[in-house]
Amino acid sequence: MKKSAIIITSLLFSFYAVAQEGIEFGGFTGTSYYMGDINPSKHFYSVSPAFGGLMKYNLNEHYSVRTSVNFGRLFADDNDFDKAMQQHRGASFETGFMDLSLMMEFNFLPFETTIFRKGFSPFVAGGISYMFIAGNSGPSSSYLNLPFGVGIKYGISKKVTIGAEWLMKKTFSDEIDGIINFGQKTDPSLIHNNDWVSLAGFFITIKPFERKGDCPVYW
């Protein structure tokens, strides 16, 4: 029994040590913006500052799993657009949000910061997230959404990675802007008018633990 406990404990510590090698912590700073009934198609309309933090676990040179939390604001005003319907409607909104995400990244090139020749790659990311909205008026709300996006990353040292990314978040709600399928209240669409939230900016991550086989000769 004692021997089994020692073996199990050793395996748990070994797993923890291996997991540590692939962990990265970091931060994000950039912009956030909204698309929906008021802004149906204009990217980077009325951007607001956004920031957040992330933790990433690198499975191998191509795949990573990450969790993140981001904060930002969303704003839109019908008066910013020339359509007669919007000028007549005159709707607007402003709100803050917090977003929690779980995503998978795929690196198109083998990426490993401990090896100089593998220190750069474009990537795609996708997953699931939950967004908490705190409007200036009315009750707070929360929405499930599907985030996906693209980016690039570069290892500036064996511990530090910098990069840029652009994420689009497809929400399952048409209520963020306070306008629910304008003109279709009796027969609302479930597809076309759901609101979108986007984050675009830069990130930096730090790998606090050494990976076995790290070799300074490449640096």
Image (cartoon, helix red, strand yellow):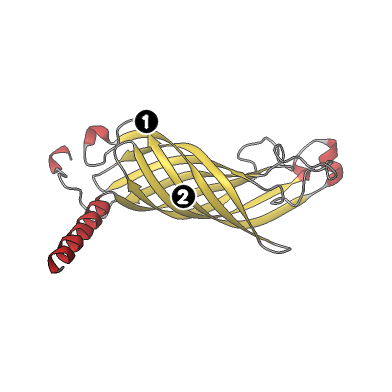
Q: Residue drawn at (14%, 69%), measured in percent from left and top?
A: 2
Label 2 Cα neighbours within 10 Å, binned few <14 / some 14-19 / many ≥20: some
Vertical relation: 10 (above or below) 109: below
Q: Is residue 96 left or right of residue 179?
A: left
Task: Specify the amino acid type for callout 2.
Answer: Leu
Is residue 16 or residue 153 the one in the foreground?
16
Can the viewer see residue 194?
yes
Q: Which SS class for mark 1?
A: loop
Residue identifier under label 1? 108
Q: Which SS class for mark 2?
A: strand
Q: Position of residue 125 (x, y in %)?
A: 45, 39
Residue 24, label in figure: none
Q: Position of residue 65 (x, y in %)?
A: 39, 46
Query: CA gap, disc 2 to disc 1?
Result: 20 Å
Vertical relation: 106 (above or below) 145: above
Q: Residue drawn at (85%, 36%), measured in percent from left and top?
A: 84
Q: Is residue 30 left or right of residue 197?
A: left
Residue identifier under label 2? 102
Q: Position of residue 132 (x, y in %)?
A: 60, 58
Q: Quadrant of residue 188?
A: top right
Q: Nearer the viewer, mark 2 or mark 1?
A: 2
Q: Is residue 192 left or right of residue 125?
A: right
Is residue 65 or residue 122 the one in the foreground?
65
Task: Specify the amino acid type for callout 1.
Answer: Phe
